[in-house]
Each structure stands twice: as C-alpha cells, then as structure tokens.
Image (cartoon, rainbow, N blue to C red):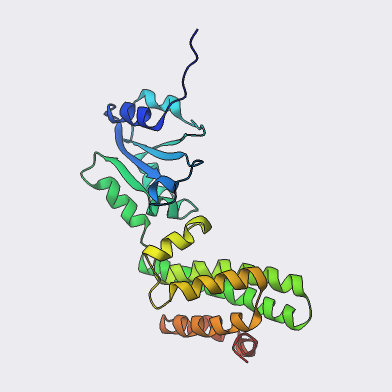
Amino acid sequence: MPTQQPLTYHAFVEIAVADPAVSGLVLKGSHAHDGMITEHSDYDLCVVLADGAATDLTRFTGHRTPELDLVILSLAEFRAAGMPGFERYALARARVVLDRLDGGIAHILAAKARLDADEAFRNSGQWLDAYANSLYRSIKNDRDGHALAARLDAADSIRFLLELLFALDRRPRPYNKYLEWELARYPLPGWDTGMLLDAVYRISGMGDTPLQRRLFARVEAAVRRSGHGAVLDAWGEDLDLMRPQ
C-alpha cells in the first residue's frame, strides 16, 4: 500500500478554493511577513467558513504538520478572534489568500489592526501604570543593591512599555519575533526606531538605570501629551526616583 503524502499548503488551498462554503483564507505568521521565512517556517492558515455552512473541510480541524497548521472557524468566530486577545497582532498583519466577501475579509483584518480611540486610551493608561510600576521597582532595587531583581523588573518594564507605545499609536503590539520587522516598516510616530530598539536591548539585558531614567523622561512627555498625566501624577513623589537625576 503506498504511503499517504502529507497535505501540503498549496494542495489544501486548491481544495478550499473549490469549496463554496469557504468565505476566506487568511495566511498568518512568517509567510505573511516579507523576509521572515526560514527553512523551519510552516504555513499558518485560517479557513473562514460561511456561518452555518455545511462542509467536509471540518475534517481538517486541528490539522498540524511541520508544513501546515490549519485553524478552521466560522465567519462570526473570525470576526471575534483576537478582539481582544493574543491573536490580534497575527491577524492584523495577516495576508488575504481568498476573499469571497468582496473585500469583507480584508475589512475585518483592517479592523483588528487598528484599536478604536476609547480602547486605545483605556489600554494606554493601564500599560502606563504597569510600566511605571516595574520601572520604579527596578530603579529602587538597583539603588538597594538587588541586582538580579533590578534586571528582572527592568525586563518586565520593557514589555509594558512596548504595549504602551503601540497602544498610543492605536496598534496591537507585535510579537517579539516581529518587533524589528514592524518598526522597520511602520515606525512609531515621534520615536527614532534605532534609538528605541537600542534602549530595549540594553535595558532588557543589562538593566542600565540611567538609560531607564532617560527613556522615562521621553515617555512621560509623550503620555502627558496624550492625556495620561493623571496616571503618572498618582505616583506622587515616587516619580522623582524614575526621572533623570
């Protein structure tokens, strides 16, 4: 009996395109990011089915091989995916392979790529407070001679800072793998990409308290312009420790 060959990406796309129950196909991950494909990259494909449609494609639910990872979901589930959630960035930068909704699939993806004003403002305030908390702890631990704790808190602060900066620009934060890719193509307004990435690298790896303080000065100015002064003012005199000495 001949050995059955694994299902390839191109073979599956051909099957899915022939099925009228399929409203759209959306490619995520490395294959949706120019220049990020390696020999280890698989095809990460979302199959969007018309709501209530009957199709034999559901037999591929959970399909995962070194080449092809399939997620099969209804149109309603696709609209809700990542809203909110970890999947949002992947879908925000996903590539449309098939759109039977006259641009409807692309429109849904575009909505995931842009936070609405209220969501962005709310999230920015929360991430700002988390950033200030970790920054304060890092600097205080460095002052008190707790080197490991200071570095760990510094690394935590960078995570929250990136969430904050992207939320201020009404964008979902990219995964770490795609941070440099994202900033090279879509810089954050008001930030020099090289300077920011260098600060992220040095603070997350070494702590670097003086650099943390200089970076905070820039962040403070930016968030106050964006209407988040009250979040920082709630820190009172503790702000003095975070600012350049």
- Residue 22, given in percent of the width and then of the height, sits at 31, 33
- Residue 116, given in percent of the width and then of the height, sits at 36, 65
Tell me the residue at 50%/53% (across/down). Answer: 86
- Residue 183, given in percent of the width and then of the height, sits at 42, 65
Left or right of 135 in this view: 57: left
- Residue 2 vs residue 168, the one in the foreground: 2
- Residue 26 vs residue 22, the one in the foreground: 26
Q: Farthest residue in the top direction? A: 1
Tell me the residue at 48%/61% (across/down). Answer: 179
Tell me the residue at 44%/27% (across/down). Answer: 60
Q: Farthest residue in the bottom direction? A: 245
Residue 205 to residue 245: above or below: above
Rendering quarter of residue 57: top left
Residue 118 to residue 112: above or below: below
Q: Farthest residue in the left direction? A: 102
- Residue 150 vs residue 125, the one in the foreground: 150
Residue 170 to residue 141: above or below: above
**Looking at the image, can residue 98 be seen?**
yes
Left or right of 139 in this view: 20: left
Total tally of numbered discs in the picture? 0
Tell me the residue at 53%/85% (across/down). Answer: 217
**Which image quadrant: the C terminus?**
bottom right
- Residue 88, given in percent of the width and then of the height, sits at 44, 53
Left or right of 97 in this view: 227: right
**Looking at the image, can residue 53 be seen?**
no
Rendering quarter of residue 23: top left
